């Protein structure tokens, strides 16, 4: 399964000039290895220039990305080289000569039947003492005259721990796109070659800055409008679907009550399945509606004094049949006396049922525990399971909308991927927060913290 970063790297095209600013080898290779793999898939001649990493480390990373390095090198589609074979061929660095060298490589690749040239280089060679290394910014600016319209693209890799802030500043000035962490970012701070190389007047520089700001604002407005349109569409469709679904559930209940005549055993079982599936679909639609309202800032809460201990026990009674059906041990631990907070009981119950339902979905054996504990400034409610747990890289994304975890090694858990998103938004609407602790293979604990009273201005 590809990561979000890999998907964004796959969208890069010939003519792109990108900088990768990284702090760890993991960040570096997580971007550069898929970049080479995608180029090979597109029949591009791919070059990786090492310097910060060893050739062995790069080859291992390419193999881990699914590249048969031996076969690709053997057919002449891949080269892993050093700075002496690229940037410092004559022992010195000359920007114009390097750009011409790339042009010749691209033309040679096309002549050999490849669709273009793809190159990524570890730029730490520029920290060396060879003549011309201090002209790195000039070189990066000149590349922006060559790449647009060419059959080539590149990622220039910069180790933030080794380059000074001054150099990183110039790197951002000379690359239209930047890879930062797990995202490919359009670069607002990019400047065209004439600005970087000093061939532009101050009025021209100011006009460029103004145009960049206007372009950024226009993009932001377009995203806001698209998001609003999406929310409106989801809300409208959810309302339209809810009406016929309620009718289906109502008719199924009438059939099950046998008001129109007795049902055969097989027919009764089929009616029960219709009712169960319709109610499940209605729950999914209700989740989409809640998500749409919270995204649009239209969700409201009814804040009243609530005995959370009693609410936890009531929610446990609703959930117990679901746990018993699997079967799983289910335990409840709540203070014997009242624990009062000012909150929305219905929203808290909705969050807890979401968390409990997830716990059942991802737990095949063992137990689930629902526990509440009073604190001086509020209350903490925990849902603990002994299920499959959550990998570290997934834990950072589980509250993102439409993000679905896998319920096993091959199948996804199902649903809309909105349960945790909605739960977190409702928790924050109540002034609280949901946190998670998990060990892969050993289960997860989701904790809902609620304040005694929501602070003014918390939304």
Image: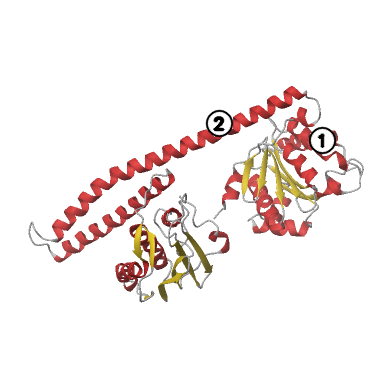
Measured in 3D between alpha carbons, the distance from the residue under mark 1 to the one under mark 2, in whole angstroms, is: 31 Å
Does 220 sit left or right of 248 as displayed?
right
Residue drawn where x is 33% and y is 58% of the image: 346
- Neighbor class of circle 2 (other Cα within 10 Å; few <14, some 14-19, many 20+) is few
Asked which secondary structure carries label 2, the reply is helix
What is the image's colouring?
Answer: secondary structure
| Above or below for 218 versus 414 | above
Is any atom of residue 278 visible in this view? yes
| Rendered image: mark on residue 400 | none
Q: Looking at the image, which is closer to me, 88 or 285?
A: 285
Asked which secondary structure carries label 1, the reply is helix
Specify the quadrant that holds the N terminus. Answer: bottom right
Quadrant hosting residue 176: top right
Q: Looking at the image, which is closer to me, 19 or 368?
A: 368
Which badge, 1 or 2, is on the more N-terminal residue? 1
Q: Position of residue 387 (x, y in %)?
A: 46, 71
Q: Position of residue 320 (x, y in %)?
A: 32, 71
Residue depth check, mark 1 versus mark 2: number of the one nearer the observer: 2
Does 243 sit left or right of 300 as displayed?
left
Q: Position of residue 177 (x, y in %)?
A: 67, 39
Residue drawn where x is 68% and y is 48% of the image: 36
Q: Looking at the image, which is closer to me, 13 or 259?
A: 259
Residue drawn where x is 63% and y is 42% of the image: 185
> What is the tally of numbered marks visible in this picture?
2
Q: Residue furthest left?
A: 261
Does 265 sit left or right of 122 as displayed?
left
| Above or below for 385 versus 12 | below
Q: Which residue is label 2 attached to?
A: 218
Does 347 sit left or right of 199 as displayed?
left
Q: Position of residue 324 (x, y in %)?
A: 32, 73
Quadrant hosting residue 8: top right
Q: Which residue is label 1 attached to?
A: 138
């Amino acid at each position: 399964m590809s990561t979000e970063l890999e998907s964004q790297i796959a969208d890069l095209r010939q003519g792109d000039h990108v900088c990768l600013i990284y702090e760890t080898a993991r960040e570096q290779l997580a971007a550069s290895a898929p970049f080479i793999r995608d180029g090979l898939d597109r029949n591009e001649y791919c070059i990786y220039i090492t310097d910060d990493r060893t050739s062995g480390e790069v080859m291992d990373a390419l193999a881990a990305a699914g590249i048969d390095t031996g076969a690709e090198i053997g057919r002449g589609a891949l080269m892993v080289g050093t700075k002496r074979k690229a940037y410092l061929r004559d022992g010195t660095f000359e920007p114009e000569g390097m750009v011409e060298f790339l042009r010749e490589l691209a033309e040679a690749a096309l002549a050999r039947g490849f669709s273009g040239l793809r190159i990524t280089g570890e730029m730490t060679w520029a920290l060396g003492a060879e003549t011309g290394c201090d002209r790195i910014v000039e070189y990066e600016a000149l590349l922006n005259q060559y790449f647009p319209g060419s059959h080539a693209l590149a990622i220039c890799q910069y180790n933030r721990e080794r380059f000074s802030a001054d150099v990183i500043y110039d790197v951002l000035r000379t690359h239209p796109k930047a890879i930062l962490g797990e995202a490919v970012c359009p670069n607002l701070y990019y400047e065209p070659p004439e600005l970087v190389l000093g061939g532009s007047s101050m009025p021209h520089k100011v006009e460029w800055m103004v145009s960049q700001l206007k372009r950024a604002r226009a993009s932001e407005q377009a995203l806001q409008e698209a998001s609003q349109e999406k929310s409106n569409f989801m809300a409208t469709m959810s309302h339209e679907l809810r009406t016929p679904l309620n009718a289906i559930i109502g008719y199924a209940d009438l059939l099950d009550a046998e008001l129109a005549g007795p049902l055969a055993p097989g027919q009764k079982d089929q009616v029960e399945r219709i009712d169960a599936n319709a109610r499940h679909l209605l729950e999914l639609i209700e989740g989409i509606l809640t998500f749409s309202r919270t995204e649009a800032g239209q969700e409201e809460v009814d804040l009243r004094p609530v005995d959370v201990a009693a609410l936890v026990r009531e929610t446990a009674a609703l959930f117990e049949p679901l746990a018993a059906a699997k079967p799983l041990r289910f335990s409840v631990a709540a203070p014997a006396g009242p624990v009062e907070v000012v909150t929305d009981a219905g929203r808290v119950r909705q969050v807890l049922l979401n968390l409990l339902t997830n716990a059942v979905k991802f737990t095949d054996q063992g137990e689930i525990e629902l526990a509440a504990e009073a604190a001086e400034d509020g209350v903490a409610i925990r849902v603990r399971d002994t299920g499959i747990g959550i990998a570290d890289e997934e834990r950072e994304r589980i509250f993102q909308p439409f993000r679905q975890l896998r319920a096993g090694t091959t199948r996804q858990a199902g649903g809309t991927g909105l349960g945790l998103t909605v739960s977190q938004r409702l928790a924050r609407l109540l002034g609280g927060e949901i946190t998670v602790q998990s060990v892969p293979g050993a289960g997860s604990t989701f904790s809902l913290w609620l304040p005694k009273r929501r602070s003014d201005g918390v939304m």
